[in-house]
Amino acid sequence: PQTVHLKDYQPPAFLINQVELNFKLEPSATLVTSLLHLQRNPAHPDGRAPLVLDGQQLKLLSVEVDGQPLAASDYQVTENHLTLPQPPAEFVLQTQVEIDPANNTALEGLYLSSGNFCTQCEAEGFRRITYYLDRPDVLARFTTRIEADKEAFPVLLSNGNPTEKGELDKGKHYVIWEDPFPKPCYLFALVGGDLHPVKDSYTTSSGRKVALEIWVEKENLHKCDHALESLKKAMRWDEDTYGREYDLDIYMIVAVNDFNMGAMENKGLNIFNSACVLADPKSETDMAFHRVESVVAHEYFHNWSGNRVTCRDWFQLSLKEGFTVFRDQQFSADQHSPAVERIQHVALLRTAQFAEDASPTAHPVRPDSYIEINNFYTLTVYEKGSEVVRMLSELVGWDTFRKGSDLYFERFDGQAVTVEDFVNCMAEVSGLNLDQFLIWYSQAGTPQVKAEGRYDAEQKTFTLTLKQETPPTPGQKDKQPLLIPIKMGLVSRTGHPLPLEIDGEFHGTETVLQLNKAEQSFTFHHLESEPLPSLLRGFSAPVKLSYAYSKEDLAFLLQHDPDGFNRWDAGQQLALTTLQELISAQQQGQDLELDPLLINTWKQLLEGQPEDPLMLAELLQLPSEAYIAEQYECVDIDAIHIARDYARKTLATALYPEFLRLYHLYTSDQPWSAEAQQLAARRLKNTCLSFLVVTDAAEALQLAEQQFQQADNMTDQQAALTCLAHAENNQPGDAALQAFARQWARDPLVMDTWFSIQVTRPHPDALDRVKALLEHPAFSMKNPNKVRAVLGAFAGQNRHNFHRRDGAGYQLLANAVIELNKTNPQIASRLVLPLTRFQKLDDFRKGKMKEALERIQQEKLSPDLYEVIQKALV
Ligand code: HT7
Ligand code: ZN
């Protein structure tokens, strides 16, 4: 497979002004006729370059230039290209191809999902539909005519506005769609099927009425209200916050069951994984409601950040994804608790993205090269990319950021641009030199910031010294210092925020220090006594910051830090330090004993009437095994699991009455509502229940059983089921699992959670259960949601069982990857990732993981898997 390099970018040799597509939909033999209005691109250096169109798995039937059929000698067809060596400077090319959607298991291009036609063209799926210049910097106006059997496929959708429809012979019908906005082909979409709409409308702030339609299978019509409400909120929010209005007369969302990712922002016709659009309180949890809201918003926001202004090439992917994730995070923070939203995003970043940064597949937010671009839809491009945009907004301030965003959308509307174009807009409106900031886009790895504080009682000064270092990553040994915004404050030992005076300048009680050298000191004056620094507030930069706090300091900050995020983080650090002591004791064969400081701190949190129950639920989460592992150079999987399990049980036993009191306090017989107070109550109550049940007390198991049976909503039912199914004693859990499967057998999304709950069981039988579930009639290797629910959840969330010393977890995953390599390479190369994370493990496990990878390597690999495995095994 070939490597593509950012440095080799060249503008396209030809431009396409207008595309006319004609589809005759048949499951196994769809005919696609395409008319491309082409002209030479004056910006290309070679005025005689051939026309090389991309195409994959297409059966070419005919080629015409300006209405004249071409002889076979006038063009060349290879596995991936159709080449016209000497085309005219301006002409119309007509091609006709046949494709086989029914056998398209890769779910890229045009495929069938539950009998409905749908497309997925990002990143390079359009080339599986017709011959084209399949690159994001070729923008064209599309007209799409779709013809199909009317009974089987009564609904025919594409981008833009419908302009014509009619009946044809032999029970067929057709619809024509025109999209007035020039777009790259990755935003093309087509849907044909037996779908039903939920309809509404939205009036933009300038008074234009937009039709809103969500298309789903008939049995899901009752699950669309939440997505529709979320869409309207997102439309309003983007007008209010970014001044961005929707631009077409219609906005459609279609739900499909088989989808490789979450959703796709095709112009005017978003296609969604049904898990990211359907939500009903009986069958979906609060978490699923939140996911639907944020994904609907994310895809909607792409209409500007991605569609109206798009990427020059796929290296710039974070230009649209990082910015859009930042926008959807801002939106969620405005709808819910900003501190809790921030906590949840940071928790994901610090475990999964930091782990990616330390792995063989580490790459910069803007990669320098790729073999398969699908491998780069990563946490680094999305989540770290969003952090980079967040830092920019902090550095220039919101009002200036908004001016920069306006300038970016106005200047580049209808164009395909780069990360520099975006950052330059911010530099232009702020007057700041952001050259050093750009390194965030090109340098991989997580910077480590060591902070040290020294109080001088005589001078009444506190000097904070910050040192930054980014560890080497594959292919990038030497790292440069970054511009790192460190938001901070000082807290007095009586718990008050202190005024900050640096070099005679006053900064109130909070400031953003700009760390831009390898080492820098900042001295704060006029401090009567030694303060406690509160650093990296709100997680102002995606770095690992360390400071030698005592456990008492952390307990103090947990109570007194004025920053909500940092209060939570102090609690996490306190728990982490305590867990690390247990891990050392376990490794040295000593008895485990939990520091009473942690128990007492939690007791204080649990006592009284909580001010913010949602935040309290966050404070009561112990750091995950994955996050604990992140802290070590050499990871002891078993000791981490034993120590964390011991801490959970000890806290649960010691604080049983407190957990029980809160459980009852927040259990109500009110019917379900989405309202914030109820949502917080459910989250806190279910957190308490999970602690109660780990004690194995009969009373606790009974409470869980009762909640399971009586719940009027999935949040409570699923929480109780998880407690029961993860309990030491199998019997009540197995009974509940059976009852649940009987109740929900006909709802595939609920069955996904049924699968996940079982495979994340902490007990040693987990792997056998995974094997049994792979044979379950509701499981299918062809459905990515099922693969994620069983294999993804097992390898990603059941660490100590996946890393069993006998290597059975690795073998199981390798077998699945080998199978998926043949049918769905994209999913195969995501699923294999846990096997590539062996660097910090013991030699024995390392060896077993490499063996599993080498076994996969024996296969005829897709480029996707080839790229990942080759990086892992170098
Ligand atoms: N922009 C979309 C990415 C996406 C995707 C990429 C590769 C293969 C399948 C895919 N489906 C969706 C989704 C988004 O970030 O909004
Ligand atoms: Zn996106």
Image (cartoon, helix red, strand yellow):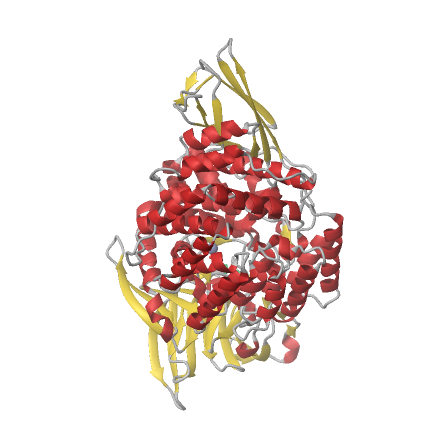
Q: Residue furthest bottom?
A: 170
Q: Position of residue 449 (x, y in %)?
A: 58, 32
Looking at this view, name the residue that lies furthest to the left. Answer: 207
Q: State the residue at coordinates (48%, 52%).
A: 697
Q: Position of residue 872 (x, y in %)?
A: 70, 53
Q: Position of residue 622 (x, y in %)?
A: 51, 43
- Residue 55: image quadrant is bottom right
Q: Quadrant of residue 231?
A: bottom left
In the image, 48: left or right of 508?
right
Front residue of 383/854: it is 854
Q: Residue at x 68, y 37 (%)?
A: 478
From this view, report whether residue 183 is shown above or below residue 242: below
Residue 616 visible in the current orientation: yes
Q: Nearer the viewer, residue 600 or 755?
A: 600
Q: In the drawing, does residue 581 fall left or right of residue 174?
A: right
In this rendering, the count of numbered labels is 0
Q: Residue at x 65, y 65 (%)?
A: 817
In the rendered image, the quadrant that contains the N terminus is: bottom right
* Furthest residue toward top: 458
